Image (spheres, rainbow, N blue to C red):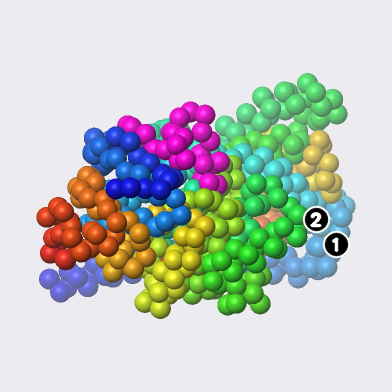
Amino acid sequence: MNIKHSKLEAINLDAYYGDFHALKNINIAMEEKAVTAFIGPSGCGKSTFLRTFNRMNDYIDGFRIEGQILLDGRDIYTNDVRVDELRKEVGMVFQKPNPFPKTIYENVVYGLRIQGIKDKKILQETCEKSLQQAALWNEVKDKLDKSALALSGGQQQRLCIARALAIQPSVILMDEPASALDPISTAKIEDLIYELKKDYTIVIVTHNMQQAGRVSDHTAFFYMGELVEYAKTKTMFTSPKDTRTQNYITGRFG
Amino acid sequence: MRVQEKIIEGLLWLSAAITILITVSIIWVLLSESVLFFSEVSIVRFLTEKEWTPLFAEKKFGIMPLVAGTFLTTVIAIAVALPIGLTIAIYLNEYANARFKTFIKPLLEVLATIPTVVYGFFALTVVTPFLQSFIPGLAGFNALSAGIVMGIMIIPMISSLSEDAISAVPRSLREAAYGMGSTRLQTAFGVMVPAASSGILVSVILAISRAVGETMIVAIAAGQQPRLTLNPLVPIETITTYIVQVSLGDVPHGSLEYRTIFAAGMTLFVFTFLLNNLSFWIKKKYQEKYD
């Protein structure tokens, strides 16, 4: 598959939880400013793979990888890479909305605060800009000092996206970002993803075939720790090459 | 069969009832003896007189010196136990690996199993001489070393309960913090501790309540001189030690002097009762609701 510029790459990647071989020799390159969807049945390794890009698996006892993960051509698993710096470049949105038990405002500016930014003007501007990007500004602009936990699930998830955008990452990883939301909130998140790919490289894990079809440019199908097929989303959904892919996307298993 | 069920149910009910009955009778004894005491000494005198000398010829019944002594040793104990206990809790949660944690936690709890009389002698024979080597004015019996050792004793209480509170914070919050590029320290202090603050507060209140009621350490190491002071370097007396002193002495049963211990006991009971209820209330009110 031809790719304009590969933002993220995995080269001969194997991952293990203790003795369990979770990812098997994955090779993939993901295009900049595009949406790549990871699909596959539960336990196929897609979330594990997503989390190797911001090293979120580092805290799991017994987890290790072999091979390379490259961000802009640079290996992120070498010793001179600081994970906290890496995660400012590679933001993440989780399956369940997880705002901090703080105000809406403090949630959005959290990333700036931990970088030591105290300038009120910068914080306020970033807050407004990020909430606007996340299509949440109009709903919350009058209650920025209210607790984030008082928002609805869909609003919380968009708040989490705004929080991730505030530190200006170049990549956003989304781990089933709409699976805990109602259809209307899901549609809003999908619209948002479509907007965001103008500026960001997005990798999304999803269980929802229609969602993958709607939002992504490329799709990667994982099965039992293997990358079975990786192609343009249109191609994969209309003419999958592998029978396993075909069976999965037509709903024969999963 | 049915009869057997009834008997077992009855026994279970009885054991619950006995516990409540004992509590009620203790409160009853405290109350009735205190009422007799306060019929002779007014509550105003009790709360405002600045000296506590019920065993002297010239009797003064101001509880404040005992309250001050209790307050002083408790504050010192918490000042020792809170920073250390909280640091341990954060370390165990955010830094220590799982194997080390399972090894170190029971070890910490050993601190809580040492008899308090041993702590008392430790304070008197080790800590006080050690402190005297660089605090020249320190008396042989003092609030400082008793407070410090009491603090050491309640470290496991704070560390263990705070650790529980921090690990009860949902993993998703920790992931959110790490995902934003927080360091471990920023995650611990910026997210985990605030989210667990109600649980940590409860641990501190229970620790205070434990320190207020602690008897042996202060009886051995703090001296037994009621004194209205906040100077930690001189001998003081706490409410609990006074009760021990009189209970062991030859004060005639039924006398006014004898009843002072019930008044003191009542005061102590009110303190710990309020503290325990406060912790219960905080737990209920601020229990974080993240499903």
Mark 1 and mark 2 lie on one chain; the one further toward the N terminus is 1
Query: Eyeballing the image, is B259 above or below B146?
Result: below
Callout 1: 10 Å neighbours few (<14), some, many (20+)? Answer: few
Residue at the image point whose x is 66% and y is 57% from the top: B268
Instruction: Give me the disc on residue B214.
Output: none
- A110 in relation to A29, above or below: below
Q: Which residues are magenta?
A: A62-89
**Percent x, y of residue A227:** 24, 46
Question: Which of the 4 image quadrants contains residue A131?
Answer: bottom right
> Is residue B154 at least partly visible in the picture?
no
The foreground one among B13 and B96 is: B96
Q: Given the image, on which type of amino acid does mark 2 rest?
A: Met
Asked if the stretch drawn in magenta spans residue B24, the answer is no
Q: Which residue is at 69% across, 63% downward?
A: A125
Q: Nearer the viewer, residue A37 or B161?
A: A37
Residue that lies at the very extreme toward the top in this rendered image: B133
Residue behind mark 1 = B48
Residue B136 placement (x, y as % from top left): 84, 25
Chain of the residue on which disc 2 is drawn: B
Specify the label residue B64 is tagged with.
2
Say whether residue B189 is left or right of residue A172.
right
Query: Residue at the spot x=64%, y=35% of the render?
Result: B149
Between the residue at mark 1 and the residue at mark 2, the CA separation in whole angstroms equals 7 Å
Question: Element under label 1?
Answer: helix
